[in-house]
Image: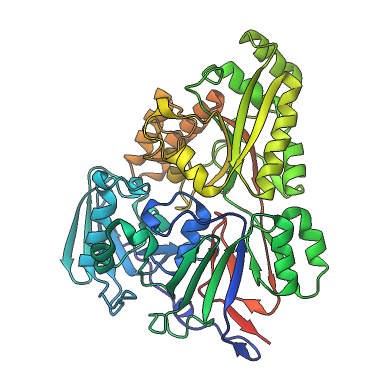
Amino acid sequence: MKLKSILLSTALAAAVMLPGTVWAKSLTVAIPNNLTGLDPTNINDTLSQTSIRLIYQGLFGFDKDMKLVPLLAESYEANDNATEFTIKLREGVKFHDGTDFNAAAVKTNIDRLANPDNKLSRRSLVSMVKEVQAVDATTVKLILKEPFGAMIPSLAHPGAMMISPAALEKFGKDIDRNPVGTGPFKFKHWGADTLEVVKNDTYWKEGLPKVDGVTIRSVPESGARFAMLQTGEAQFIPSFPPELMVVAEKNPNVEVTASPSIVEYYVALNTTKKPFDDVRVRQALNYAVDKKTYCKIVYNDLCEPSDSIIPKNLAFHVTAGNYDFNLDKAKELMKEAGLEAGFETEIWSGSNTEAIRAVQFIQQQLAQINVKVNVMPLEAGVAAQKIWSVEKPEDATVQMYYGGWSASTGDADWGIRPLLYGQSFPPAMFNVAYYKDAKVDAAIEGAISTADPAKRAEFYAEAQKVAWAGAPWIFLGENQNISAKSKTLSGVYMLPDRGFLLEEAAFSE
């Protein structure tokens, strides 16, 4: 197999030159939810994992278009059947505590993440690794248990970012409060709704960073985030509220950007609990929700209804079917299931404005088929405990959960396996529907056991069609990503997976 190599371009390494005077001041970013942790290997939400990109870096990562780029690695070579990956590392990089970044550090990190005894939530990114060999100081070899064509994209996921081995030894499990990486900023403080980082003066990319520090503020109320942008209290708002987009565009000091996403929103249905154990009920709920109206109400029409279990912009997507709004069909299925009179249930969601608006819409829609839905918004930390930390399916109390998922590896594997594989129940991964289907499992296993794109495509097509018919979710929509920033700010980008990049942030007069 010929060498697969990704070399860092001069453009990525060089400082971005801006016209006019560049001001080295601090940047404030306002986000809709609280961060849930600072250990990249053990957090589940996009906001937390993308925020700590300020501090940490992986061997590989993504640019603003989510194209794979090298970071702490310079290149890699894979054997023909994708069971061995030899990775060449960048030289001369140090962690914030002065520890050298080298092959031994990589081995420490991957061994820690892959060890099931550590019960780290992102273990599945490297669970296929059998052995990590530090060939020399700048060369690492990964030997896999079986072929895995998505190995390098998995290493680019934020959950596989590199932590200082010295910090891991010093802080142990408390690394979650004491992050030490190789990134453009060093950790200063995290508490309540605020993360603060300061400039890393010895950062390995020449000329970066260009701001003195970054503050990430959690502000759930949409109007409050917009007000912070208008007053200058915040300069960048990723996940900007779509209903305020038109107003923001009229502000001469604000720049608004809308771009395609790889995010799919859904309501997970706990298939181990009645009546969600009946596929007819699950399908009825899908027909009872008007997806086009969902897109209009929740995302101001900057959205389109889902047609599969993964979004259209993700690799290996196929159209799996549709659940067009059809109350007669929904009522017929409910009658067949013996639930013509309906039932009462509850739906959990995030506590931000957008999520609450979404679940209230779901509540109204399902009332049309006599399903009474009680809305229960949860703060991010509470959700982590009530949903993602449950050890056994029988202990799960979730009935319906509204959320969104983005495959932060850019590959279909991470859009399907964590959510719908029969071995991905919490706390191991994120199958909060507790869905298990033998055909879906076989397709997922087939796809991860080959590096042949054509074979992977066949397996993923099967998984999508079977899971769509099985309806473990109410399939909703795929929104556009909207962000807003001060016009004096440049070098900040929202990624297709709802993450953001701040490394090149700079202010000009």
**In the rendering, at what x and y percent does residue 362 appear?**
69, 33
Above or below — where is 262 with respect to 331?
Answer: below
Quadrant of the rendered image containing residue 429: top left
Residue 199 seen in this snapshot = yes
Report the front residue among 324 and 505: 505
Residue 448 percent location from the top left of the image: 35, 40
Q: Residue at x 37, y 61 (%)?
A: 161
Residue 305 vs 242, above or below: the answer is: above
Q: Residue at x 77, y 49 (%)?
A: 300
**Is 64 drawn above or below residue 281 in the view shown?**
below
Q: Quadrant of residue 371?
A: top right
Placement of 259 over or under 323, stated as above or below: below
Question: Going 28% across and 70% down the picture, which residue do you hit?
Answer: 89
Number of callouts: 0
For the residue pair 404 and 408, the one nearer the viewer reads as 404
- Quadrant occupied by the C terminus: bottom right
Apparent side of residue 17 relative to residue 85 in the rendered image (left or right): right
